[in-house]
Amino acid sequence: MTMSRFLNGAEASRQYGVLAGHYAASLLWADPLADAAAEALQPFRDAWWPMVVRALDAGIDRMSDAPPALGALLAALPPEPAPDFWASMEAGRAAIARTGNSAALIVQCASLVVANWLPPAKRISSRHQSSHRLAQTGDWWIKLHKPGSLRREAAGYRATLQLRLSNAFLRRDGRVSGEWDRRAQGEPVNQSDLFFQVSAFTAIVLDGLYRMGYRLTQAEKDGYYAFWRHAAAVLGLNKTWLEMIDAERCGQFWKMWLLVNPPPDAETKALAQQAVDELATAGGGFAFFDRALLSGTTHWLLGRDVAQGLGMTNGSMTYLLPALYPPVAFLSQRLGGSRERRLTRTIAALTGS
């Protein structure tokens, strides 16, 4: 199989073993239950999500118009965690939520910016809907980090299910367009892409917080990975990948991903720059300062090679942040944490709300 998304395969196998082989194989794995549901919901057009909400609230058995494929998807969603597991998840979620603007800054300049490095499948709609994509992802992250967010009736749980189905519609668009080269690029929004997203929201976020000066306990970090194992199950990640959501393998995955994927192309750089510009403009402060802050933080947290590869400018913030930010983080921890005001404000501006 010719796979343009799996370069340096021999070296990846030498360094990462089973993880590399699993990555290569799962480039061809999608989400059959969500794909079948999306196909069945396609005729309902804009009414598809209200139908899903009604099915969650009233029960699929009480809806005569709901397609069986939707019932199959909902029946396969993960059960409510046991109380002790839930307590661990909540401890991890709460620890990240307490870092407020710091975690939000990592999400903006690392997780969201790096997402533009994903293959063309994730960029099918992003060329013309970048603001919508940034706002949707940021809003999803905020909802996930509210107390009790992964209860079945909570906004975080439902936003995660909505994202899963949106990914299925995106896969469908890629397939029916006739422009998608599955042999070279794998399935659109495949299982490896989903694990990339989970790694960005776990390993990259936790590593970034450590660099910023936050010191989470081992129980809090373990709880945060448990939190994401449950969230990822709702998102449609398969069982084999779910078992790999931990500090060691999410951290290894990010390093391996940099090795096996092609370097950023001109489109990737343009999209990353567009993301930074839109986030800076919507931030509610001085756009010039926010742009420098986001670019500098990307350099600091992801390293020069990644940041420059994405076209991020290397200014004074790159050198000031490592010296100035940790004392701010220490003070925040002593005062009991903060809120994600920055990201909330930015998302509101992007959505026009």
Image: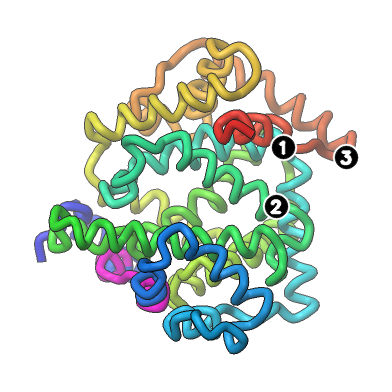
SS type, badge 2: loop
- Kindly report the distance in space between the C-alpha atoms of the residues bearing marks 3 and 1: 14 Å
SS type, badge 1: loop
The overriding secondary structure of the stretch rendered in magenta is helix
The amino acid marked with disc number 2 is: His
Question: Which residue: 77% across, 53% down?
Answer: 94
- Kindly report the distance in space between the C-alpha atoms of the residues bearing marks 1 and 2: 10 Å
Q: Residue furthest bottom?
A: 61
The magenta segment: 23-35
Q: Earlier in the sequence, mark 3 or mark 2?
A: 2
- Label 1, residues with CA under 10 Å away: few <14, some 14-19, many ≥20: some
- Measuring from the top left, give residue 34's x and y in whole percent: 41, 72
- Kindly report the distance in space between the C-alpha atoms of the residues bearing marks 3 and 2: 17 Å
What residue is shown with label 2?
Answer: 145
User: Eyeballing the image, is 348 above or below 205?
Assistant: above
Q: Which mark is residue 197?
A: none
Q: Tell whether label 2 touches label 1 (CB within 8 Å).
A: yes
The foreground one among 49 and 318 is 49
**Is residue 258 visible to us here?**
no
What residue is shown with label 1?
Answer: 340
- Label 3, residues with CA under 10 Å away: few <14, some 14-19, many ≥20: few
